[in-house]
Amino acid sequence: MTPWQERATPLIQRMAEDMNIRNLAQKTIDAYTYHVGRFAARLEKPAEQATAEDVRSFQLYLVEEKKVGWSTFNQAVCGLRFLFRVTLPRTWHVELIPFGKRPKTLPQVLCATQVEQLLSCVRSLKHRTVLLTLYAAGLRLGEATSLQLPAIDSQRSYYTSTVARDRRTAWSHSHRDCWRNSARTGSRTVRRCTCSPAALRTCR
């Protein structure tokens, strides 16, 4: 996303300042001002004179012509709501700007055999231990990448999330042994996976 400073207009600058005052993230500012800039570019009048019908027309343009994803659509809605709630307050209800309903899809779940095949392709013990940790503890990616040794209680066999500190996950003894082997041998390559996915998830 292009930084807002590279496409600054008086409207974009004022909105970015309003967002800075509220300590919003730089990426959020860039995203919201991007969509507001597109909205303003389509208007044939100053943004101060925009109506709810103008917003509706822009939303139809995003859906029917640009065919954007619903995540992008809803991001644009957030930007427009901020614009007309804070930067350019309107007399009409900003809540009239609707969000799009995102379709729900079920994630693809691997069976134990598929997990074993995946792990058997990883020759680095360190890398395989990371994958085992993701699988056995059911970690989110952010939790796995921020995992620290103090978060692991090997005596009671559980792990405390460093992202959501109130979330604890039990670990099996097999998984604990994998960690110890990895710590002793470092990144040494191995010929095959010695841990069964079923054994790793016995505590789950």
Image (cartoon, rainbow, N blue to C red):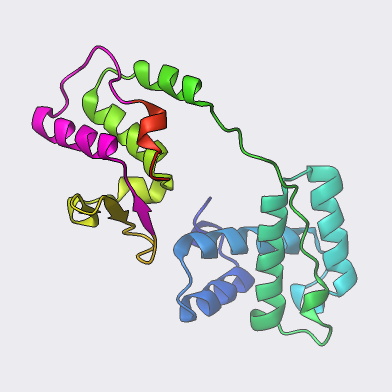
Q: Who's the residue at 29% across and 52% down the image? A: 158
Task: Name the residue at 39% across, 61% down.
Answer: 167
Residue 171 vs 56, above or below: the answer is above
Asked if residue 9 lies left or right of residue 164, the reply is right
Q: Nearer the viewer, residue 112 or 57?
A: 112
Give the percent coordinates (x, y) of residue 153.
Answer: 21, 54
Q: Quadrant of residue 128?
A: top left
172 lies left or right of 53: left
Q: In x, y percent, where is residue 34?
A: 62, 58
Q: Quadrant of residue 133?
A: top left
Q: Where's the C terminus, which quadrant?
A: top left
Residue 145 left/right relative to 93: left
Residue 106 to residue 78: above or below: above
Q: Is 108 located above or below residue 50 in the figure?
A: above
Q: Name the residue at 34% across, 33% down.
A: 132
Viewer-proximal residue, 53 or 108? Answer: 108
Is residue 182 covered in magenta? yes
Res. 81 image quadrant: bottom right
The structure residue drawn at horizontal position 51% and vertical position 57%, both measured from the top left corner, is: 6
Q: Residue furthest left?
A: 184
Spot occupied by residue 187 in the image (x, y as percentages of width and height): 17, 26
- 79 drawn magenta: no
Query: Measured along the vertical axis of the image, is residue 129 above or below residue 164?
Result: above
50 left or right of 169 in image: right
Which residue extends farthest top?
A: 191
| Residue placed most toward the observer, 137 or 81 | 137
Percent of width and height locating residue 14: 57, 77
Which range of residues does the magenta coloring cover? 168-195
